[in-house]
Structure formats: structure tokens, C-alpha cells
Image: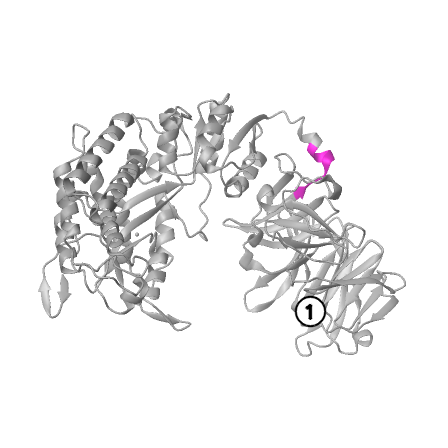
């Protein structure tokens, strides 16, 4: 139902840094740089060897991570209605051993473990958190632990201790004003008192040095004499991460090591190359300058990942008996994690991601080389690659798969991606572009054809006007573009020619609209209560909630109009596709990886929309709530199940947007610009469009 000036008109419609760090005397390094002067980092696969081991533990069980190695992890484990307990977990057997609990009313604030299995932890009393009660020492002897208690009260005079660092021969205990050096029996070996204006100091014990650091300053102290050796400032505050043996910081996608020596900042590796999402890191430790351990969060829980960058490990991979497969892609970070998991799972094949390529040269490069697997950036590339013979069909592999059930994915995928009866890829994600309108304007939505759309535009000629389109001719071109998105398929008649009569009618109707310039943008117009149409990529219920809060009005999907009312709908695009190259020497091996890729669990943290039905339902339902809420002064409208159903229906009714659609619309848009500016007559414009589009249609056969 349309409402305006108290009049109701029945209207039918349907339900989309390089971190530049300036340190005195420091060189600036760029990730991916191949200068051998500061290390052996090069941008190629097999540079890194990584092993992933599941910890079989949820991150919600974790209060704090203190220490880990490939065999054992020490962490605080949350407990219901009780203080956390210090737990040692054997990675292989999954056995847990409680090292310390709250039986003495002690709360653990820091813990550490060295390579010999010696564990130290600092605790304080709940009643007096400023008074350090004890330092627990646990010596590992298979599964037997002994405990020694050391009273720290006299050493720190009630000052709260923040960190313990344990080395191969002694223990360091730090507060904000001093640190102690002790032996494993608790005997005091030295005390260092310092003054600092920093809010928070952190520490690394490296060789003969103690490195004290804050967000922007480093001080290096001799670990035996406690004499200050050097100090320097960082020009910009950065996030620092202390390993057990060195000091590091993150820059962009990479890890950089800080060394007090002559080369203080050495780029170590790229997170994309190792397949680690930096935001998922819970715990980080280095064993030396070339071996690292990460605890990361995944959808399945916590995983322990070991990364090696040393040359010896790389040379060993050259004798790997597995068959090598190659993958080329536009964005390697999107696939690196899956590649690492596959390589750690499969004994027959090893996938190598080659350096990223430029999008415009994608098809040419894939043809020139015998690649096994290719990223397909979108539907237009998918069709072009098939037309040029670059992709291998996967129908037989799909039908015979024991792990992929075709019914797990939306059935329309197979129709949309079928070319000459064959399927060449299955996308893992999709998104919806649709025409949206305010719910208070559009009621009882079904669908609409081009005649109803043009009738609506006569009533509200400024529905698509905003400050981004100040020229009347540009606004008319925008209206035509919206009209063509759902109409262009119906304009192509059975004999592969364009329906010039219908096109001329659409152009003439749009050109006659009484359009006025608008100084407000669409967000302001929606808030102002205007009758508007919004072309937007609203993919999911989450994004709908965000858009409605931004515009302060509830929105509903309308669908793009079409010549045939039943063909009205939004546009669907697919991505995260990998195909098997027609030049692959081992398509069966390539399918093994593709099958593994399609079976990966979809991240529930992702904002993208999965094509697997089960993942889609979870993705949509996680944002439902029943009542309006106000968060930080912004009103969020309820996203009900009925609205999710509308979005799902919009996905079901959406059209596949092809490269041919895009090219035809581009030709029509180019030629009609002269007509809307009164530089050409309608007949001449139609004649030119007919000639150009018909030529395009003939060439596409």
C-alpha cells in the first residue's frame, strides 16, 4: 500500500604499515621485501612449515594463557562459582593436571614455563590483592609435580607483582618499580629498582639481557650486573608482543623482531603466508628466531600452531614424497588457512599457493601455466573462463563424492552455475543486491513489473534523487539503470535480438519524468520521511538491522522490476569459488583439495553469507531479537523471523547477474546519455543500441 497526503493507492510489489617505525639507527623493512641483508624472508610457498594441533578446548574455558610448548600448555581454566585453577594440559593425551587451585584462597595472576618443564606462578590473596603470598615452583617429572612455596611479602613491601619470567637457570619476578632475580630454591640473587612514567611495563629475558618495554619505549638491562646498557624510543605507539626469547611487534600483516643488536627490526614472516588470522591469536611464544608457537581461536575451539621459518626445515620439504599441486588466486590470505590444514591432513598431496596475480590478467596467466587450481573471483570470470576453456568440469566428482551432499547447498546454485549442462565450481559464499523501500510506504509486497515501476516513478519522480546525482540527466540514467537490472533479460527476445519497442517505451517514460535536483543524500531523505527507493547490497539480517538503525526507518526488499512480473527480483552474486584448471596434470588430486575446501566449517564470525543451507540458517538466526533496543544512542529495530524469511525469499527470487547483462546495460547506458541530454533523438538512439547489442549477442554465441 502506498500512502501520500492521506490518499491510499493500491500498489503491488515484491520482497538485499608498512609499519613505518622510526627508531634511531633502525632500517625500515617492508613485508614481502626480498633483501637478504636482514634475513631470508622471500615471498614464496614452502618457506614455512607449520603444524596445527587441536587443544580440544573452548576459549570460554580460558581465563589466561601463561605458557605452552608442542607437548604441554599451562593456563588458567575457568570454573563455575569458583576461582580459576592453574592447569597443565598434555597436547597428545589431552590429559589435564591441576597445578594450583583456590584451596589456599589464592588467585593466580602470572605463570611461566621454561623448556625444561619448570613452571613458576605468582599468586595473591583475594582479601589483600596488593600482598604477594607465594611463588609456586612445579618441577615436572613425567606426570609428577612438586611444589615449593616462597613468601614474597618482604621483597615487595605490599606492592603488587605483575609478571614472572623463568629461564634455564633462574627466575625473575617483576612489579612496576622493581624486579628480583632468584634461584629455583627461592634464594634472592639480586634486586633492581627503577623509575618509570609508563602505565604498563612488560618484559622479555633474552640471553644476557633483560628487555623492559612499554608501548613506545625500550630499555635494555644486563641481567647479571643490572646495569642499563641502552634505551630508545619508538616514534609511534604500537602493539607489542613479547616472546620467551625475543621481542616482537605486528606491522600490517607481518611479525617483526626487535633485536638490540646492529639490525634492530627484522621482518620475520607474513601471517597470511602461515595461514594465521592475527586477530585470532590468544598466545604467542618463540623458541628461537625461526620457530614460533601460536594458540589461536577457531570455530571448533583452540588450536596450537607451530611455525618454522628456518632454511633447514625448508630444504627438508624439498624431499616431500607428496605430489605438489598449485593454486593461483587474487587474495592468498583468503585461502592460506585452508591450504595449511589440507597439507597437514593429507599425505598424498601438498598444495602451494603461488604469488597473487592481478585481476585483469587472471585468465591469461592461468592459461599460460599448468596450474591445478584457480580462484574464480566472481560470476563474470566464471563464465569467461569456461568460455575460454580454462576450467575442468566437476560433475562426476561431485556425484561420486562421499563427503559432499549436493542437497546441503541451495539448489539454485547448480542452476545458476550450470554451463552447457556442466558444473565447474561451487561457491561457498553469496550476496544479494536488491531494491529496498521504507516499510511505511510499501505494504503487502508481492512483485512488480516495469509498468508499475514507471507508474510509481510518475507519482514520485524524485524517489532515486540525491545529492550524489545533481544533474537531471544523471538521475534519469540512474532510474534507467535500476529499471534495466531486472528487465534486461526479458528485453532479449527468442531470436537473440533486443526488444526495441519495449526499450523505447521505457526510455520515453523516464525522459518525461518531472525530476528535480535534490541537495540531500539518501540517508538524510530516509530520515526526513521521504518516499525513496534504495539500491543496496544488504546481504543478511545483521546488515538489515544496521541499515535500519542508520536510516531510522524499517526497510523491505522490493525486487528490481521486470517486463514479466514473475521475473521481478534482486540480483545474486557468488564468490569464494575455486575451480580445477583444465591444464592440471592431476585433476583427481585437485578435486581432493576442492572437496576439502567445500567441507570446511563456515566461520560464524564472518559477515558474509554462506551457500550451505545449514550455515545460512545459523548465520541468519544469530541476529534475531524481538524488541527495539537503543545502543549508544542508536535505535535498532527488531529483526524478526518474518524479516529473515523475506531476505531468504529475496535470495530465492534473485536473478543471476551475468557478464552479458553487464555489457548490454553498459551499452544502453552509454547511448541513452545523449538522449537524456537532448543531444540525440529517440529513434536514432534506439537504432544505435539495436545494432551494438545485436552484434554483442551474436558474438556471445
- Which residue shows up at 14% across the image and 52% down it? 454
Using the rendered image of the protein, determine whether residue 92 is visible from the camera's viewpoint.
no
Q: Which residues are magenta?
A: 307-314
Judge from the rendering whether residue 215 lies leftward or rightward of residue 245; answer left or right: left
Q: Is residue 153 above or below residue 88?
A: below
Q: Residues within 10 Å of mark 1 (few under 14, many from 20)?
A: few
Q: Is 310 inside the magenta-drawn segment?
A: yes
Judge from the rendering whether residue 66 lies leftward or rightward of residue 686; answer left or right: right
- Which residue shows up at 37% across the image and 59% down it? 623
Tell which of 125 and 203 is nearer to you: 203
Tell which of 434 and 510 is nearer to you: 510
Residue 498: percent from left, percent from top: 18, 34
Determine which residue is flagged by label 1. Answer: 200
Which picture quadrant has residue 152? Answer: bottom right
Which picture quadrant has residue 134? Answer: bottom right
Q: Is 341 inside the magenta-drawn segment?
A: no
- Which residue shows up at 36% across the image and 36% down it? 380
Q: Farthest top residue?
A: 585
Residue 5: percent from left, percent from top: 12, 70
Which picture quadrant has residue 308? Answer: top right
Residue 415: percent from left, percent from top: 28, 34
Look at the numbered disc 1 and give the secondary structure of its residue. Answer: loop
| Quadrant (top left/top right/bottom left/bottom right) for the N terminus | bottom left
Amino acid at each position: 500500500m502506498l500512502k501520500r497526503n492521506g490518499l491510499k493507492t493500491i500498489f503491488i510489489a515484491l520482497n538485499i604499515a608498512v609499519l613505518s617505525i622510526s627508531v634511531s639507527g633502525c632500517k625500515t623493512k617492508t613485508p614481502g621485501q626480498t633483501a637478504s641483508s636482514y634475513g631470508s624472508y622471500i615471498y614464496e610457498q614452502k618457506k614455512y612449515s607449520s603444524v596445527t594441533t587441536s587443544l580440544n578446548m573452548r576459549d570460554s574455558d580460558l581465563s589466561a594463557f601463561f605458557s605452552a610448548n608442542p607437548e604441554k600448555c599451562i593456563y588458567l581454566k575457568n570454573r563455575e562459582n569458583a576461582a580459576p585453577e592453574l592447569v597443565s594440559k598434555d597436547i597428545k593425551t589431552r590429559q589435564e593436571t591441576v597445578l594450583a587451585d583456590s584451596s589456599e584462597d589464592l588467585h593466580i595472576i602470572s605463570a611461566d614455563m621454561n623448556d625444561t618443564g619448570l613452571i613458576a606462578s605468582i599468586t595473591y590473596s583475594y582479601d589483600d590483592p596488593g600482598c604477594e603470598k607465594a611463588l609456586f615452583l612445579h618441577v615436572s617429572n613425567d606426570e609428577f609435580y612438586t611444589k615449593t612455596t616462597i613468601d614474597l611479602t618482604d621483597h615487595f613491601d605490599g606492592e603488587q607483582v605483575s609478571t614472572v619470567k623463568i629461564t634455564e637457570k633462574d627466575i625473575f619476578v617483576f612489579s612496576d618499580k622493581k624486579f628480583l632475580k632468584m634461584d629455583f630454591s627461592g634464594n634472592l640473587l639480586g634486586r633492581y629498582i627503577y623509575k618509570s612514567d609508563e602505565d604498563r611495563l612488560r618484559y622479555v629475558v633474552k640471553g644476557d639481557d633483560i628487555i623492559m618495554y612499554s608501548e613506545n619505549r625500550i630499555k635494555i638491562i644486563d641481567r647479571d650486573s643490572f646495569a642499563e646498557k641502552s634505551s630508545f624510543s619508538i616514534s609511534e605507539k604500537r602493539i607489542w608482543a613479547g616472546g620467551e626469547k625475543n621481542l616482537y611487534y605486528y606491522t600490517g600483516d607481518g611479525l617483526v623482531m626487535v633485536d638490540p643488536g646492529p639490525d634492530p627490526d627484522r621482518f620475520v614472516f607474513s601471517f597470511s603466508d602461515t595461514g594465521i588470522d592475527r586477530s585470532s591469536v590468544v598466545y604467542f611464544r618463540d623458541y628461537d628466531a625461526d620457530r614460533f608457537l601460536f594458540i589461536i581461536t577457531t570455530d571448533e575451539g583452540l588450536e596450537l600452531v607451530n611455525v618454522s621459518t628456518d632454511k633447514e626445515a625448508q630444504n627438508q620439504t624439498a624431499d616431500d614424497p607428496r605430489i605438489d599441486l598449485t593454486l593461483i588466486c587474487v587474495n592468498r590470505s583468503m585461502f592460506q588457512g585452508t591450504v595449511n590444514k589440507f597439507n597437514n591432513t593429507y599425505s598424498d598431496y601438498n598444495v602451494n599457493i603461488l604469488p597473487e596475480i592481478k585481476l585483469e590478467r587472471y585468465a591469461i596467466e592461468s592459461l599460460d601455466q599448468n596450474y591445478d587450481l584457480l580462484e574464480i573471483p566472481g560470476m563474470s570470470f566464471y563464465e569467461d573462463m569456461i568460455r575460454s576453456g580454462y576450467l575442468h568440469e566437476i560433475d562426476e566428482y561431485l556425484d561420486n563424492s562421499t563427503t559432499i551432499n549436493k542437497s546441503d547447498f541451495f539448489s539454485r546454485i547448480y542452476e545458476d552455475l550450470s554451463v552447457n549442462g556442466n558444473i565447474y565450481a561451487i561457491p561457498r559464499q553469496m550476496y544479494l543486491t536488491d531494491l529496498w523501500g521504507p516499510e511505511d510506504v510499501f505494504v503487502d509486497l508481492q512483485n512488480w513489473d516495469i509498468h508499475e515501476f514507471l507508474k510509481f516513478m510518475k507519482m514520485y519522480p524524485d524517489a532515486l534523487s540525491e545529492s550524489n546525482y545533481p544533474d537531471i540527466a544523471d538521475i534519469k540514467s540512474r532510474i534507467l539503470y535500476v529499471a534495466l537490472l531486472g528487465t534486461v533479460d526479458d528485453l532479449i527476445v527468442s531470436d537473440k535480438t533486443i526488444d526495441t519497442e519495449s526499450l523505447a517505451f521505457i526510455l520515453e517514460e523516464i525522459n518525461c519524468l518531472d525530476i528535480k535536483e535534490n541537495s540531500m543524500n539518501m540517508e538524510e531523505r530516509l530520515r526526513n520521511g521521504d518516499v525513496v527507493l534504495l539500491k543496496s547490497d544488504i546481504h543478511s539480517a545483521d546488515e538489515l538491522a544496521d541499515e535500519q538503525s542508520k536510516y531510522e526507518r524499517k526497510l523491505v526488499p522490493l525486487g528490481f522490476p521486470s517486463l514479466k512480473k514473475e521475473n521481478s527480483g534482486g540480483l545474486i552474486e557468488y564468490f569464494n569459488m575455486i575451480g580445477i584448471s583444465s591444464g592440471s596434470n592431476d585433476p583427481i588430486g585437485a578435486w581432493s583439495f576442492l572437496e576439502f575446501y567445500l567441507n570446511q566449517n563456515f566461520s560464524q564470525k564472518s559477515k558474509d553469507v554462506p551457500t550451505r543451507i545449514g550455515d545460512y540458517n545459523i548465520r541468519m538466526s544469530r541476529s534475531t531479537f524481538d524488541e527495539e533496543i537503543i545502543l549508544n544512542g542508536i535505535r535498532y529495530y527488531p529483526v524478526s523471523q518474518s524479516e529473515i524469511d523475506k531476505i531468504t525469499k529475496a535470495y530465492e527470487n534473485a536473478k543471476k547477474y551475468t557478464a552479458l547483462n553487464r555489457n548490454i546495460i553498459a551499452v544502453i547506458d552509454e547511448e541513452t546519455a545523449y538522449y537524456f541530454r537532448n543531444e540525440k533523438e529517440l529513434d536514432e538512439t534506439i537504432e544505435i543500441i539495436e545494432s551494438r547489442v545485436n552484434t554483442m549477442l551474436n558474438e556471445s554465441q
